[in-house]
Amino acid sequence: MPESTLSGIKNDVVKSPATDRLKDELQNYLRARAEHAVTQLGHRLGDSVSKLAEPGGVKAPSRAWPRAARRSARASHPARPR
C-alpha cells in the first residue's frame, strides 16, 4: 500500500504544471549564472591583457621572491620615469 501511495504522489508531482515551471525557472537561473560567470571571466581576462600591453605594466616583485630574483627583476625592468 505505501508503495502505491508514493507512486501516486510521484505521478502527481511529475505531471504538475508547477513542476514544469520550477524546472524552467531553474534552467533560466542556471543560464543567467553561467553567463554572468563567463562575462566576469572575460572582464578579468581583458583587464589582465590590457595591463600586460601597457609599457611598464610589470608589477614589482613580491616579497616571496628570493632577493637575487628581485635584484635581477629590477635590473631587467627599470622604473619608468614619470
Image: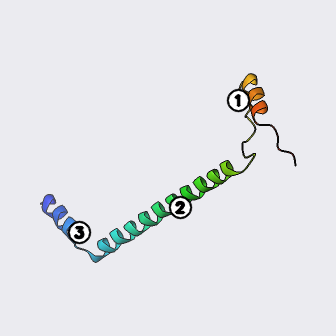
Q: Earlier in the sequence, mark 1 or mark 3?
A: 3
Mark 2 or mark 3, whichever is nearer to me: 2
State the CA–CA distance, disc 2 to disc 1: 32 Å
Residue 50 point in image, percent of width and height = 66, 54
* Quadrant (top left/top right/bottom left/bottom right) for the N terminus: bottom left
Image point 41% across, 69% down: which residue? 28
How many neighbours does mark 1 have within 10 angstroms: few (below 14), some (14-19), or many (20 or more)? few
Looking at the image, the residue that sits furthest to the bottom is: 17
> Looking at this view, is 25 or 77 the one in front?
77
The dot on residue 64 is: 1
Q: Amino acid at mark 3?
A: Val
Mark 1 or mark 3, whichever is nearer to me: 1
Residue 73 point in image, percent of width and height = 74, 31
Residue 45 point in image, percent of width and height = 58, 53
- Numbered label tally: 3
The dot on residue 39 is: 2
Instruction: Name the residue beneath numbered marker 3.
Output: 14
Q: Amino acid at mark 2?
A: Thr
Q: Amino acid at mark 1?
A: Ala
Secondary structure beneath dot 1 equals loop
21 vs 42: above or below: below
> Looking at this view, is 49 or 44 the one in front?
49
How many neighbours does mark 2 have within 10 angstroms: few (below 14), some (14-19), or many (20 or more)? few
**Is 17 on the left-hand or right-hand side of 51?**
left
Secondary structure beneath dot 2 equals helix
Image point 73% across, 35% down: which residue? 61
